[in-house]
Amino acid sequence: MAARELTRDEKKKIRRLVTGMCANYDGESGLCLPLDCPCYMLHKCWTGAYCRYFRNAVLPLDPALEIALTDEGMAPELRACAVCGRAFLPEGRQAYCSEACKAEGNRRKSRERMRKMREKRPGGRYDLPAGKA
């Protein structure tokens, strides 16, 4: 995997994981306890070499970040959910992050489709097909 520069979002997520979840990080001194030096991961700018403990124990806590940092090839593109705006890793042409967002998105699309259909009808009314009343 060719090294690439970390994005601002990736740096922020790494910092949050190190300061919040890493057992080797001392918050008072900012040192890595086993190495007795400043934490290597807090000032990381490029992909490639990671602290072994961070890679094995802390990084799996954020699966999206783990895939972006360790997957072969280009970093996968995160997509924003069409309903809530939360970033997620899409599977194919997926537009929503969850089933709840999918249901809400389909409801919004249906409402918009019906609104347009009513605008096309004279008088703005939609007549039900015969036998449905």
Image (spheres, rainbow, N blue to C red):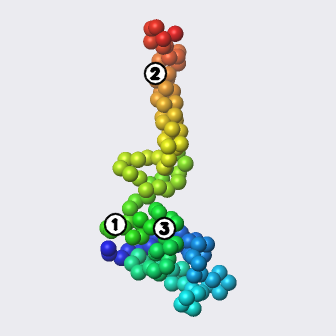
| Residue receiving disc 2 | 120
Task: Please state if 94 lies on the left or on the right of 35 as rendered.
Answer: left
SS at mark 1 in the image: loop
**Is 66 situated above or below 24?**
above
Residue occupying image coordinates x 53% and y 42%: 100
Toward the viewer: 1 or 80? 1
Q: Amino acid at mark 2?
A: Lys
Q: CA distance from mark 2 to mark 1?
A: 47 Å
Quarter of the N terminus within the rendering: bottom left
Q: CA distance from mark 1 to mark 3?
A: 19 Å
SS at mark 3 in the image: helix
| Residue receiving disc 1 | 74
Residue occupying image coordinates x 57% and y 86%: 32
Q: Position of residue 87 (x, y in %)?
A: 49, 56
**Is 47 situated above or below 86?**
below
Q: Between disc 3 and disc 2, whose residue precedes?
A: 3
Residue reaching furthest bottom? 36
Residue occupying image coordinates x 41% and y 66%: 68
| Residue receiving disc 3 | 60
Residue 2's image quarter?
bottom left
Q: Position of residue 57 (x, y in %)?
A: 50, 73
SS at mark 2 in the image: helix
Task: Please state if 61 lies on the left or on the right of 95 as rendered.
Answer: right
Toward the viewer: 132 or 51? 51
Q: Amino acid at mark 1?
A: Met
Q: Are marks 3 and 2 in contact (CB under 8 Å)?
A: no
Q: CA distance from mark 3 to mark 2?
A: 52 Å
Q: Position of residue 112 (x, y in %)?
A: 50, 31
The label nearer to you, 3 versus 2, is: 3
